[in-house]
Image (spheres, helix red, strand yellow):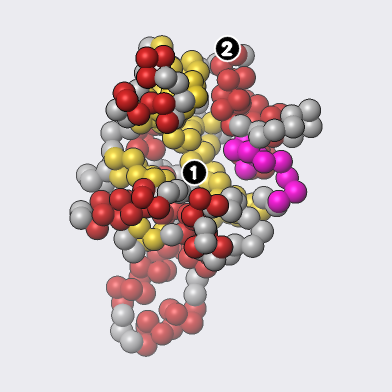
Amino acid sequence: MNCTKAIIPMAGYGTRRLPITKAIDKCMLPVGNRPIVDYVVEDCIKAGVSDIIFVVGEQFDQLQQFYGRNLLLEEYLKGKGKTKELEEIINLAEKATFHYVVQDQHQPYGTAVPVALCADMIGADEQVLVLMGDDFIYNRDGSSEVARLLAAAESAGTTAGMLAVEVAREDVHLYGVVRTEDGVFKEIVEKPKTEDAPSNLVNISKYLFDKDLLHHAQDIAFDHSITGERYVTDALNRYIASGKKIAVQAVQGEYLDGGSTDGWLYANTVILAK
Protein backbone atom coordinates (compact mmCIF):
# COMPACT_ATOMS: atom_id res chain seq x y z
CA MET A 1 0.00 0.00 0.00
CA ASN A 2 1.03 3.58 -0.63
CA CYS A 3 -0.19 6.22 1.84
CA THR A 4 -0.79 9.62 0.21
CA LYS A 5 -3.60 11.00 2.39
CA ALA A 6 -3.84 12.45 5.90
CA ILE A 7 -6.80 13.42 8.09
CA ILE A 8 -6.20 16.29 10.53
CA PRO A 9 -9.12 16.88 12.95
CA MET A 10 -9.47 20.57 13.88
CA ALA A 11 -13.15 21.05 14.71
CA GLY A 12 -12.86 21.44 18.49
CA TYR A 13 -13.46 24.71 20.31
CA GLY A 14 -10.07 24.65 22.04
CA THR A 15 -11.62 25.32 25.43
CA ARG A 16 -8.31 24.85 27.26
CA ARG A 17 -6.97 27.91 25.42
CA LEU A 18 -9.93 30.26 25.84
CA PRO A 19 -10.40 33.17 25.45
CA ILE A 20 -7.89 33.40 22.56
CA THR A 21 -9.46 30.40 20.80
CA LYS A 22 -12.75 32.27 20.63
CA ALA A 23 -11.18 34.17 17.71
CA ILE A 24 -8.26 31.99 16.61
CA ASP A 25 -8.46 28.25 16.01
CA LYS A 26 -6.14 26.47 18.46
CA CYS A 27 -4.27 24.76 15.64
CA MET A 28 -3.63 28.15 14.01
CA LEU A 29 -1.81 29.61 17.01
CA PRO A 30 1.72 30.59 15.92
CA VAL A 31 4.84 28.63 16.69
CA GLY A 32 7.61 30.78 15.29
CA ASN A 33 6.11 32.35 12.19
CA ARG A 34 3.87 29.43 11.27
CA PRO A 35 0.67 27.96 12.73
CA ILE A 36 1.03 24.77 14.75
CA VAL A 37 -0.80 22.69 12.17
CA ASP A 38 1.64 23.62 9.40
CA TYR A 39 4.37 21.61 11.14
CA VAL A 40 2.07 18.59 10.96
CA VAL A 41 1.36 19.25 7.28
CA GLU A 42 5.07 19.60 6.48
CA ASP A 43 5.89 16.31 8.20
CA CYS A 44 3.24 14.58 6.08
CA ILE A 45 4.49 16.13 2.84
CA LYS A 46 8.05 15.00 3.58
CA ALA A 47 6.65 11.44 3.83
CA GLY A 48 5.00 11.63 0.40
CA VAL A 49 1.50 12.71 1.39
CA SER A 50 -0.21 14.77 -1.32
CA ASP A 51 -3.79 15.11 0.00
CA ILE A 52 -4.56 16.74 3.34
CA ILE A 53 -8.10 16.42 4.69
CA PHE A 54 -8.90 18.99 7.39
CA VAL A 55 -11.94 18.37 9.57
CA VAL A 56 -13.07 21.86 10.59
CA GLY A 57 -15.80 23.45 12.67
CA GLU A 58 -18.64 25.54 11.32
CA GLN A 59 -17.30 28.98 12.17
CA PHE A 60 -13.60 28.84 11.37
CA ASP A 61 -12.12 29.75 8.00
CA GLN A 62 -8.52 30.56 8.97
CA LEU A 63 -7.23 27.36 7.37
CA GLN A 64 -8.76 28.21 4.00
CA GLN A 65 -7.21 31.68 4.21
CA PHE A 66 -3.79 30.34 5.16
CA TYR A 67 -3.57 27.59 2.54
CA GLY A 68 -5.57 29.40 -0.15
CA ARG A 69 -4.49 32.07 -2.63
CA ASN A 70 -4.70 35.78 -1.73
CA LEU A 71 -4.48 37.64 -5.04
CA LEU A 72 -4.56 41.11 -3.49
CA LEU A 73 -1.62 40.27 -1.23
CA GLU A 74 0.24 38.64 -4.11
CA GLU A 75 -0.20 41.75 -6.26
CA TYR A 76 1.01 43.93 -3.39
CA LEU A 77 4.12 41.83 -2.82
CA LYS A 78 4.83 41.73 -6.54
CA GLY A 79 4.55 45.51 -6.77
CA LYS A 80 6.92 45.97 -3.83
CA GLY A 81 9.46 43.55 -5.27
CA LYS A 82 9.15 41.19 -2.32
CA THR A 83 9.95 38.08 -4.35
CA LYS A 84 10.85 35.80 -1.45
CA GLU A 85 7.66 36.55 0.46
CA LEU A 86 5.59 36.15 -2.73
CA GLU A 87 7.04 32.71 -3.45
CA GLU A 88 6.49 31.64 0.15
CA ILE A 89 2.76 32.41 0.21
CA ILE A 90 2.15 30.92 -3.25
CA ASN A 91 3.95 27.74 -2.20
CA LEU A 92 1.57 27.37 0.76
CA ALA A 93 -1.34 26.87 -1.63
CA GLU A 94 0.55 24.55 -3.96
CA LYS A 95 2.42 22.18 -1.67
CA ALA A 96 -0.53 19.78 -1.33
CA THR A 97 -4.16 19.33 -2.30
CA PHE A 98 -6.29 20.50 0.62
CA HIS A 99 -9.80 19.26 1.40
CA TYR A 100 -12.19 20.56 4.07
CA VAL A 101 -14.83 18.48 5.84
CA VAL A 102 -17.19 20.26 8.25
CA GLN A 103 -18.01 18.64 11.58
CA ASP A 104 -21.05 20.44 12.98
CA GLN A 105 -22.07 20.66 16.62
CA HIS A 106 -25.01 18.29 16.15
CA GLN A 107 -22.80 15.30 15.40
CA PRO A 108 -21.65 12.93 18.18
CA TYR A 109 -18.71 13.98 20.33
CA GLY A 110 -15.37 12.20 20.39
CA THR A 111 -12.14 11.52 18.53
CA ALA A 112 -13.67 8.78 16.37
CA VAL A 113 -16.15 11.19 14.76
CA PRO A 114 -13.87 13.31 12.52
CA VAL A 115 -12.15 10.14 11.32
CA ALA A 116 -15.49 8.54 10.50
CA LEU A 117 -16.64 11.62 8.56
CA CYS A 118 -13.71 11.19 6.18
CA ALA A 119 -13.84 7.41 5.81
CA ASP A 120 -15.64 7.45 2.46
CA MET A 121 -12.83 9.59 1.00
CA ILE A 122 -10.40 6.70 1.44
CA GLY A 123 -10.32 3.84 -1.05
CA ALA A 124 -10.59 0.17 -0.09
CA ASP A 125 -6.91 -0.43 -0.82
CA GLU A 126 -5.64 2.84 0.66
CA GLN A 127 -4.15 3.86 3.98
CA VAL A 128 -4.61 7.22 5.66
CA LEU A 129 -2.77 9.04 8.41
CA VAL A 130 -4.77 10.47 11.31
CA LEU A 131 -2.89 13.26 13.10
CA MET A 132 -4.11 15.84 15.57
CA GLY A 133 -3.39 19.42 14.51
CA ASP A 134 -2.35 21.00 17.82
CA ASP A 135 0.88 19.08 18.45
CA PHE A 136 3.80 17.87 16.36
CA ILE A 137 7.18 16.12 16.39
CA TYR A 138 10.16 18.36 15.76
CA ASN A 139 13.27 16.83 14.19
CA ARG A 140 16.24 19.16 14.05
CA ASP A 141 17.69 17.21 11.12
CA GLY A 142 14.57 17.86 9.04
CA SER A 143 13.56 14.20 8.91
CA SER A 144 9.93 13.06 8.95
CA GLU A 145 8.40 11.22 11.88
CA VAL A 146 5.48 10.25 9.65
CA ALA A 147 7.90 8.60 7.23
CA ARG A 148 9.30 6.55 10.11
CA LEU A 149 5.77 5.49 11.09
CA LEU A 150 5.04 4.31 7.55
CA ALA A 151 8.35 2.44 7.43
CA ALA A 152 7.68 0.80 10.81
CA ALA A 153 4.28 -0.49 9.66
CA GLU A 154 5.75 -1.86 6.44
CA SER A 155 8.61 -3.52 8.33
CA ALA A 156 6.15 -5.14 10.75
CA GLY A 157 4.00 -6.40 7.87
CA THR A 158 0.99 -4.37 9.01
CA THR A 159 -1.22 -1.78 7.34
CA ALA A 160 -1.90 0.15 10.57
CA GLY A 161 0.36 1.86 13.06
CA MET A 162 0.74 4.50 15.74
CA LEU A 163 3.38 6.84 17.11
CA ALA A 164 4.20 6.86 20.81
CA VAL A 165 6.39 9.07 22.98
CA GLU A 166 8.67 7.95 25.80
CA VAL A 167 8.11 9.87 29.03
CA ALA A 168 9.71 9.73 32.45
CA ARG A 169 8.41 6.77 34.43
CA GLU A 170 7.13 9.06 37.20
CA ASP A 171 4.91 10.87 34.69
CA VAL A 172 3.04 7.89 33.22
CA HIS A 173 0.03 8.52 35.48
CA LEU A 174 -0.76 11.60 33.36
CA TYR A 175 -1.22 9.72 30.08
CA GLY A 176 -2.71 6.83 28.19
CA VAL A 177 0.13 4.31 28.31
CA VAL A 178 0.73 1.90 25.43
CA ARG A 179 1.31 -1.80 26.08
CA THR A 180 3.17 -3.59 23.32
CA GLU A 181 4.48 -7.05 22.53
CA ASP A 182 7.32 -7.31 20.01
CA GLY A 183 6.61 -3.79 18.77
CA VAL A 184 2.90 -4.46 18.21
CA PHE A 185 0.08 -2.63 19.99
CA LYS A 186 -1.90 -4.56 22.60
CA GLU A 187 -3.81 -1.96 24.60
CA ILE A 188 -3.82 1.53 26.10
CA VAL A 189 -3.92 1.76 29.89
CA GLU A 190 -5.38 5.11 30.89
CA LYS A 191 -3.45 7.03 33.58
CA PRO A 192 -2.08 4.03 35.48
CA LYS A 193 -0.19 4.15 38.73
CA THR A 194 3.56 4.19 38.14
CA GLU A 195 4.00 0.66 39.42
CA ASP A 196 1.15 -0.64 37.23
CA ALA A 197 2.18 1.00 33.94
CA PRO A 198 3.02 -1.53 31.20
CA SER A 199 5.66 0.81 29.70
CA ASN A 200 6.68 4.44 29.56
CA LEU A 201 5.37 4.83 26.00
CA VAL A 202 2.34 7.13 25.80
CA ASN A 203 -0.26 7.63 23.09
CA ILE A 204 -0.17 10.97 21.23
CA SER A 205 -3.08 10.30 18.83
CA LYS A 206 -1.01 10.00 15.65
CA TYR A 207 -2.03 6.95 13.67
CA LEU A 208 -1.91 5.08 10.38
CA PHE A 209 -5.31 3.64 9.44
CA ASP A 210 -6.32 1.11 6.83
CA LYS A 211 -9.87 0.71 5.53
CA ASP A 212 -10.83 -1.92 8.13
CA LEU A 213 -9.74 0.38 10.95
CA LEU A 214 -11.76 3.21 9.38
CA HIS A 215 -14.84 0.98 9.36
CA HIS A 216 -14.42 0.38 13.09
CA ALA A 217 -14.19 4.15 13.65
CA GLN A 218 -17.42 4.61 11.67
CA ASP A 219 -19.20 1.92 13.68
CA ILE A 220 -18.22 3.60 16.95
CA ALA A 221 -18.89 7.16 15.82
CA PHE A 222 -22.43 6.48 14.63
CA ASP A 223 -23.51 3.81 17.10
CA HIS A 224 -26.64 5.31 18.66
CA SER A 225 -26.42 2.93 21.61
CA ILE A 226 -23.29 4.76 22.79
CA THR A 227 -24.31 7.66 25.00
CA GLY A 228 -20.88 8.98 25.92
CA GLU A 229 -17.79 10.07 24.01
CA ARG A 230 -16.86 8.07 20.89
CA TYR A 231 -13.15 7.27 21.27
CA VAL A 232 -10.88 6.41 18.36
CA THR A 233 -8.95 4.16 20.76
CA ASP A 234 -12.03 1.94 20.94
CA ALA A 235 -11.65 1.44 17.19
CA LEU A 236 -8.06 0.33 17.78
CA ASN A 237 -9.23 -2.18 20.37
CA ARG A 238 -11.89 -3.64 18.07
CA TYR A 239 -9.39 -3.84 15.24
CA ILE A 240 -6.87 -5.92 17.18
CA ALA A 241 -9.67 -8.02 18.67
CA SER A 242 -10.48 -9.02 15.08
CA GLY A 243 -6.96 -10.43 14.73
CA LYS A 244 -5.26 -7.48 13.02
CA LYS A 245 -1.95 -5.90 14.10
CA ILE A 246 -0.98 -2.27 14.76
CA ALA A 247 2.73 -1.40 14.67
CA VAL A 248 4.02 0.99 17.36
CA GLN A 249 6.85 3.39 16.55
CA ALA A 250 8.55 5.40 19.31
CA VAL A 251 9.25 8.92 18.06
CA GLN A 252 12.85 9.99 17.56
CA GLY A 253 12.24 13.74 17.50
CA GLU A 254 10.95 16.05 20.23
CA TYR A 255 7.23 16.02 20.95
CA LEU A 256 5.82 19.55 21.15
CA ASP A 257 2.25 20.12 22.36
CA GLY A 258 0.52 23.40 21.60
CA GLY A 259 -2.72 22.36 23.30
CA SER A 260 -1.75 23.95 26.62
CA THR A 261 -0.35 27.43 27.23
CA ASP A 262 2.85 26.08 28.80
CA GLY A 263 3.33 23.58 25.97
CA TRP A 264 2.76 26.25 23.32
CA LEU A 265 5.25 28.61 24.93
CA TYR A 266 7.83 25.83 25.18
CA ALA A 267 7.28 24.89 21.52
CA ASN A 268 8.07 28.47 20.55
CA THR A 269 11.30 28.47 22.55
CA VAL A 270 12.41 25.26 20.82
CA ILE A 271 11.59 26.47 17.30
CA LEU A 272 12.98 29.97 17.78
CA ALA A 273 16.22 28.57 19.23
CA LYS A 274 16.97 26.37 16.22
Q: Earlier in the sequence, mark 1 or mark 2?
A: 1
Q: Is residue 68 left or right of residue 144?
A: right
Horizontal side of 272 relative to 145 (left or right) equals: left
In the foreground, 166 or 37: 166
Indicate left or right for 36 with 99 as reference: left
Q: Secondary structure under badge 2? A: loop
Residue 201 x/y as whole percent = 37, 25
Residue 243: image tag: 2
Q: Horizontal and vertical percent for residue 133?
A: 48, 48
User: Residue, x 52% and y 61% (percent of image)?
Assistant: 19
Pointer 1: residues within 10 angstroms few (<14), some, or many (20+)?
many
Q: Give the camera-side residue of 32 and 15.
A: 15
254 sits to left or right of 260? left
- Assign the C terminus to one quadrant of the image: bottom left
- Kindly identify the amino acid type of the residue bearing the numbered disc 1: Met
Which numbered tag is attached to residue 132? Answer: 1
Q: Is residue 44 above or below residue 226?
A: below
Residue 81 drawn above or below residue 99: below
Count of numbered labels shown in the rendering? 2
Percent x, y of residue 121: 64, 42
> What amino acid is at disc 2?
Gly
Residue 49 visible in this rendered orientation of the protein: yes
Please, what is the dominant secondary structure of the magenta stretch?
loop
Dot 1 falls on a residue whose secondary structure is: loop
Q: Residue at x 59, y 50 (%)?
A: 12
Q: CA distance from mark 1 to mark 2?
A: 26 Å
- Part of the protein shown in magenta: 105-114
Residue 184 position (above or below residue 166)? above
**Horizontal and vertical percent position of residue 124:** 63, 31
Q: Is residue 147 above or below residue 170?
A: below
